[in-house]
Amino acid sequence: MGRKCQLTGKKANNAFAISHSHRRTKRLQEANLQDKRVWWPQGNRWVKLRISTKALKTLQSKGLEAMAKEAGINLNKC
């Protein structure tokens, strides 16, 4: 599995690294991904996910079940 958020689908962005002389070279802006164990109350167990920090903040307000449903993830297989 690549470097991609499992809940939001965030991935790397193509960008330029610009030097002091304004020479531009290609670089990647990687998403801030974290391996987290999240408690799933409906399943009564921990679920291990690779999610972005933005998704982690959203997870606290929306809830794991709602976000997984939007992403099309089956939490029983995680």
Image (tube, rainbow, N blue to C red):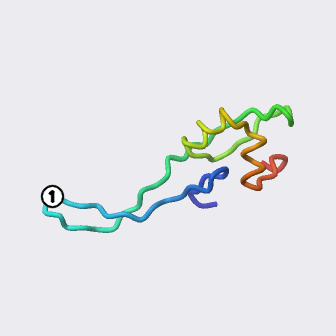
- Residue at x 63% of width, y 52% of height: 8
Q: Quadrant of the N terminus?
A: bottom right
* Type of amino acid at the residue the image marks with label 1: His
Residue 25: x percent and y percent? 28, 68
Nearer to the camera, 28 or 59? 59
Q: Residue furthest left?
A: 21
Q: Residues within 10 Å of mark 1 (few under 14, many from 20)?
A: few
- Residue at x 15% of width, y 58% of height: 20
Tell me the SS state at disc 1: loop
- Judge whether 15 appears above or below 7 on screen: below
Residue 65: x percent and y percent? 78, 41
* In this picture, residue 68 sits left or right of residue 8: right
- Judge whether 34 appears above or below 61 on screen: below
Nearer to the camera, 11 or 36? 11
Q: In terms of image quadrants, where is residue 42?
A: top right
* In this picture, residue 60 sits left or right of residue 52: right
- Judge whether 31 appears above or below 23 on screen: above
* In this picture, residue 68 sits left or right of residue 6: right
Q: What residue does disc 1 label?
A: 20
